[in-house]
Amino acid sequence: MSLQDRSTVIAHHPVVTIKLASTLDELMQCFALRAAVFMGEQACPYFEEFDGNDHAASHIIMYVDDEPAGTMRLRWFQSFCKLERCVVLRRYRGLGVHHEINAWAKRFAQRKGYTKVYVHLQKRHLAMMEKEGFRRVDDRIFKFSDHEYYAVYCDLEPMNSAIRLETDPMVVNRPEDRLDEQGILERSAVREATNPHAPHVERLRN
Amino acid sequence: MSTATQSIDGEIVSIRLAMRMEDSMQAFAVRAACFVGELDVPYSEEFDGHDFGATHVIAYVGEEPAGTVRLRWFQSFAMPERLCVIQRFRGHNIGHLLLERCRKLAESRGCNMLYTQALPTEVKYWEKQGWRRLVAADPLAAPKRIVAMVRAVDPNKPLPEIESPEAIVLHPEPQFDASDRPLERV
């Protein structure tokens, strides 16, 4: 790369991409970003950061110019979606990109039919999140992992295109962050339904 | 494999090799905390594509992952790299324990040389651990130039003469990005 090429790369407007982590590599990126920020910057112990809920959650990965830059974990309850473990890597802070992660997560929850997102918010972030429409659930203050938290929530508009029982079943099968694009299972429908099943095989004895 | 060697605040320090996915994940989390979080190394440089052809050695304080080193294997040497210890566990010689496990592992495989690439600011640390520069310090070299360092696996058997040390210094494995394309050399 010539010197001139490099300067154009540095000068151009950063490209932000947000998607659902859907491969092990992308999950690994989410985990590494959380380790960087929570373990590296906030001295959080490993087993508090990776608390056993990571394999029961959806993970969002954000790239700035193709480099992993931020992440958020979403857990699904009956009446709300819980947004948690949101981080932006230090070198990407100050661009306001966390607003884009929040907005993406809200739209994602709306599309799945949720009308409420819920957050355990570090006290210092309250003013910022109030601007995004979050309100405190009540006046409880609680603490874990060396920080004080408020419970806050934000109401979301019901979305017409939200997934419901009547939604086309093949739309429900699509990758959840690309519900408007044809998915791989729809493309599989060009094959005949031959109902293949491997025959039962007796295990050979040694 | 586990060797209890010392304790920190009553918690046993043990050094283990990553055997399960969860162990590797802990090694990666410790590296992300130290290199990406503290030192601001970009993710794609830290996780460079060599992690699945290497041995990961992890230090635990109690059950908490506290430090790690990655060991890559070559025919003529073993290469410990990405050595790091979580900030609050530093000052307890955990780095030494990790490198010592690397040395013993190399010994058990019949390897007689350890090789690493250190930042100039880290050279003193490696020298304290029994390492030496592969090539004598060049006062004219750029101050941030990576320093190739070596150590004999068995301190009683001096290293064989290295015929063309520069060949080792100048030929890293090809680097690939996540989609297997060779990374452009900048």
Image (cartoon, helix red, strand yellow):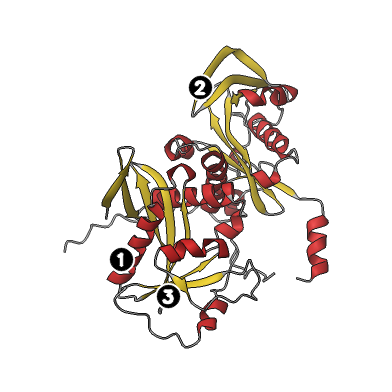
Is the residue under label 3 in contact with that under label 1 (CB below 8 Å)?
no
Query: How far apart, in angstroms, are the residues tagged by discs 1 and 3?
Result: 16 Å
Q: Nearer the viewer, residue A21 or B121?
A: B121
Q: In this rendering, is residue A120 above or below B175? A: above
The chain carrying label 1 is B
Q: Secondary structure at mark 1?
A: helix
Task: Give the labeled residue for mark 3.
Answer: B74
Look at 49% across and 45% down and name the residue there. B87
Left/right placement of residue B174 relative to residue A47 reads: right
Q: Nearer the viewer, residue A69 or B10?
A: B10
Q: Is residue B123 visible?
A: yes
Amino acid bearing label 3:
Phe
Q: Secondary structure at mark 2?
A: strand
Amino acid bearing label 1:
Lys
Task: Give the labeled residue for mark 1.
Answer: B104
Residue A50's spot in the image, x, y percent?
46, 39
Task: Give the labeled residue for mark 2.
Answer: A143
- Label count reads 3
Q: Residue furthest top?
A: A139
Residue B82's spot in the image, x, y percent?
49, 59
Left/right placement of residue B8 relative to residue A32 reads: left
Does label 3 lie on the same chain as label 1? yes
Q: Residue furthest left?
A: A206
Q: Is residue A181 visible?
A: no
